[in-house]
Image (cartoon, rainbow, N blue to C red):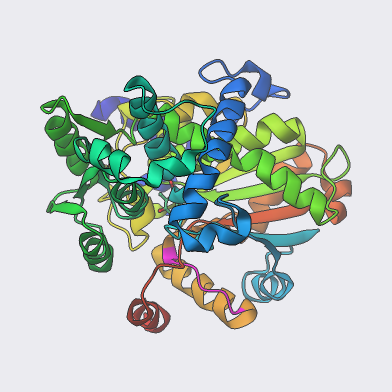
Amino acid sequence: MKSDLQRYMDTIPAVADAARLKETFWLNSRQRVGGHKEIREVRPEQIQDASQRLLRFAPYLKAVFPELEKTGGIIESELRPIPAMQAWLDETYGSGIEGRLLLKMDSDLPVSGSVKARGGIYEVLKHAEDLALKAGMLKVSDDYSILAQPEFQAFFGRHTVQVGSTGNLGMSIGIMSAKLGFHVIVHMSADAKQWKKDLLRGRGVEVIEYADDYCAAVEQGRINSDADPMSYFVDDENSQALFLGYSVAGERLKAQLEEQEILVDEDHPLFLYIPCGIGGAPGGIAYGVKQVFGDHVHCFFTEPTHACCMLLGMATGLHDGVSVKDLGIDGRTDADGLAVGRPSAFVGRVVEPVLSGIATIQDEKLYDLMRGLLQEEDIFIEPSSCAAFAALIRPQDMKAYIDARGLSRKMGQATHIAWATGGSMVPEEMKKIYRETGL
Ligand SMILES: *Cc1c(COP(=O)(O)O)cnc(C)c1O
């Protein structure tokens, strides 16, 4: 293994940079025109199926989460222009972003305050529906608000849901499963923040803590769950349901852009920048937007230098066959939502023909960006989320990509969306610490 990796380091500059913990920007040479039509692992109809399922659950979600009253049970976030941040990025980093910059505020998604409120909640709902349908207690034509009734609580209470998490996935799975009545166990890695564990315990979730990293927490969760026939394991390393839950973001984003009269077409390119941990969230979102906008959207993932697992997996083509530790990288980062050492077994393969590239960023910069956004736009997002700006502050690399695709003349009409993936549930005292962290 070691000698193989040396070969990759010798031939792929981004891998060599990554091994030295240098910030880097890998451009995907396997991206192809029309690449979204080549993806076979998942099909566009499956996005529709997920979207329909979320609509069926809307009356239930509206009934049990008062914060979803105004959207009729749809969990969605605002898409907000951030012109002051755009100017600040230019002054501070010489980003020279042409076109306009918006923030997709999944940092404020209702119910669980992170991007995981898309995939995580979706997978729990799907599992609940599968169980209730199979038991003959529910029909797809029913008004799903009946799921709030005690008989369903009692039914789900005989079942367990388990998940391994660095924090935010556990929050989504934990909050949603507990609300439905499931017994839920969240296996948390050492990176998980104390306040997330406390919050979950406060909602009746069983939290098991590990001194080890994320992969170890997942492994133990899987073993526990497999030993119990009444238990269901949310498998972040392989889950298609999670991926599909995220992918519904594509059609939702399309509607929001139309509402704001923002064009996306041949002459109006769209650029997305999404923080990446194991890959499910950014992969699902990228798959969803590619089905909607095809070659007119350019998707970039962003990772911390210390947990650049997707970059390694995709640049080497080894995917889940490589871990950051194989290159001597410790996997330790303050970006807890991204603290993953080994990428998903299937996401890298799915996005291979469509992903534009991956940029990495040092932890110190995450705090600077966090304070910049707070100061300029009065928006708080957690450090992991701030990785969304990693590619935007590398103008030379972006220019190389733009020139190579003949987009330079169109950039005045371009739209850039930094995908803020978490933040609103961070307690006040933590926000204060983050603001004052001088890393
Ligand atoms: C989980 C998470 C991500 C990335 O999602 P993955 O599916 O792990 O790639 C990004 N940002 C935050 C805040 C997260 O919690």
Report the label total.
0
Report x, y in % for residue 13: 48, 40
The stretch drawn in magenta includes residue 103 = no
Q: Nearer the viewer, residue 63 or 150?
A: 150
Q: Is residue 371 left or right of residue 222?
A: right
Q: Nearer the viewer, residue 43 or 237?
A: 43
Q: Residue at x 36, y 34 (%)?
A: 128
Quarter the C terminus occupies: bottom left
Quarter the N terminus occupies: top left
Report x, y in % for residue 51: 59, 34
Q: Is residue 232 above or below residue 62?
A: above
Q: Is residue 397 left or right of residue 1?
A: right
Q: Is residue 297 left or right of residue 344?
A: right
Q: Is residue 280 above or below residue 70?
A: above
Q: Is residue 47 above or below residue 86?
A: above
Region rendered in magenta: 378-383
Kindly report the secondary structure that dominates the magenta region of the rendered protein.
loop
- Find residue 311 and report its image quarter: top left
Report x, y in % for residue 73: 55, 51
Viewer can see residue 400: no
Viewer can see residue 61: yes
Q: Residue at x 10, y 27 (%)?
A: 227
Q: Nearer the viewer, residue 283 or 179?
A: 179
